[in-house]
Each structure stands twice: as structure tokens, then as C-alpha cells.
């Protein structure tokens, strides 16, 4: 799921800059939340695919330093949560976007999705601002 090739690199640059401004250490775990809508009538298909995620896609997500990755659904809106544990988010997202099996997965998922109107230019899944966290 994550970012699609057309938006992952741009979002990675934005996030990397935001993390640097926040004073976070390079390589420190970072949390991300994202939103997107599903088109009408595709929820069951979307859930079926994600119930049996392709092993190659799951491996790529892990190899690109994404952990604790979840997608939630309510009334046709998807909320994704993930934690990034690597040291070069931009490079990892670019590597994910170049993976042929991930591209194939995205080609199936993307037609089922509809970006929210309030997303930033270049985003597919709209990034969310974290306003609270407690361990």
C-alpha cells in the first residue's frame, strides 16, 4: 500500500525535512498516519487482497524499514499507520517504488482508491499530522 511511485519520492522529501526540523535523531523510529478513500463497491475486494498480501510485497515493506504497519477502514475511508525505523526514508521509499512486485500490487490497489481533496500536491495517500502520542 504505502506510497505510489508518483508520490513516494516527493512525500519522502517532505517528511525527511519535517523530521529534521523537529529535532528527531536520524534513524530514530518515526510514526506516520495517512488517509485515502475507497471507491464505492470495492471494500470487500480490497480487504480480500490485504488478507493475503503477497509475500514479495510484505518483504519489500519490511526491507524498506517499515514496521507495525496497519490499515483501518471506516465508511469507505482508509487510515494507514506505520513506523519507519531506517535512517534514509527517501532512499527506502524510492527503493520500494522501484520494486516490480510492489508496482504490480499498486497497479491493482490504485484503481480502487480515491485521494482525499485536502491532500498536498503530489500525494496519493494524504499525510496526517501527529498531534499526540503516549508510549
Image (cartoon, rainbow, N blue to C red):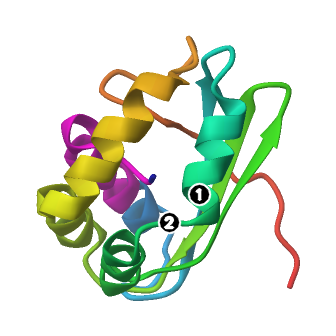
Q: Nearer the viewer, residue 84 or 106?
A: 106
The residue depicted at 76 percent of the width and 26 percent of the height is 76
Q: Is residue 16 left or right of residue 109?
A: left
Q: Could one spot residue 13 in this view of the protein? A: no
Q: Determine the secondary structure under disc 2.
A: loop
Q: Could one spot residue 30 in this view of the protein? A: yes
Q: In the rendered image, which quarter is residue 100 located in? A: bottom left
Measured from the top left, where is residue 44 in percent x and y?
A: 71, 37
Crowding at dot 1, Cα within 10 Å, few <14 / some 14-19 / many 20+, comes out as few
Which region shows up in magenta?
A: 2-17
Q: Is residue 119 left or right of residue 16?
A: right
Measured from the top left, where is residue 22 in percent x and y?
A: 51, 65
The residue depicted at 30 percent of the width and 70 percent of the height is 89
Crowding at dot 2, Cα within 10 Å, few <14 / some 14-19 / many 20+, comes out as few
Q: In the rendered image, which quarter is residue 64 located in? A: bottom left
Relative vertical location of residue 38 with respect to residue 45 in this rendering, above or below: above
Dots 2 and 1: beta carbons under 8 Å? yes
Q: Determine the secondary structure under disc 1.
A: helix
Q: Nearer the viewer, residue 105 or 3?
A: 105
Q: Which residue is mark 1?
A: 50
The residue depicted at 43 percent of the width and 38 percent of the height is 109
Q: Which residue is mark 2?
A: 53
Amino acid at each position: 500500500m504505502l506510497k505510489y511511485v508518483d508520490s513516494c519520492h516527493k512525500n519522502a522529501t517532505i517528511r525527511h525535512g519535517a523530521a529534521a526540523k523537529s529535532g528527531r535523531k536520524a534513524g530514530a523510529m518515526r510514526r506516520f498516519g495517512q488517509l485515502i478513500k475507497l471507491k464505492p463497491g470495492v471494500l470487500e475486494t480490497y480487504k480480500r487482497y490485504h488478507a493475503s498480501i503477497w509475500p514479495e510485497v510484505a518483504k519489500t515493506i519490511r526491507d524498506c524499514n517499515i514496521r507495525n504497519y496497519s490499515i483501518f477502514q471506516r465508511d469507505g475511508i482508509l487510515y494507514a499507520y506505520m513506523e519507519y525505523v531506517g535512517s534514509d526514508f527517501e532512499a527506502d521509499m524510492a527503493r520500494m517504488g522501484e520494486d516490480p512486485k510492489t508496482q504490480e500490487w499498486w497497479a491493482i490497489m490504485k484503481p480502487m482508491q480515491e485521494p482525499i481533496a485536502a491532500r498536498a500536491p503530489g500525494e496519493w495517500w494524504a499525510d496526517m499530522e501527529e498531534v499526540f502520542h503516549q508510549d
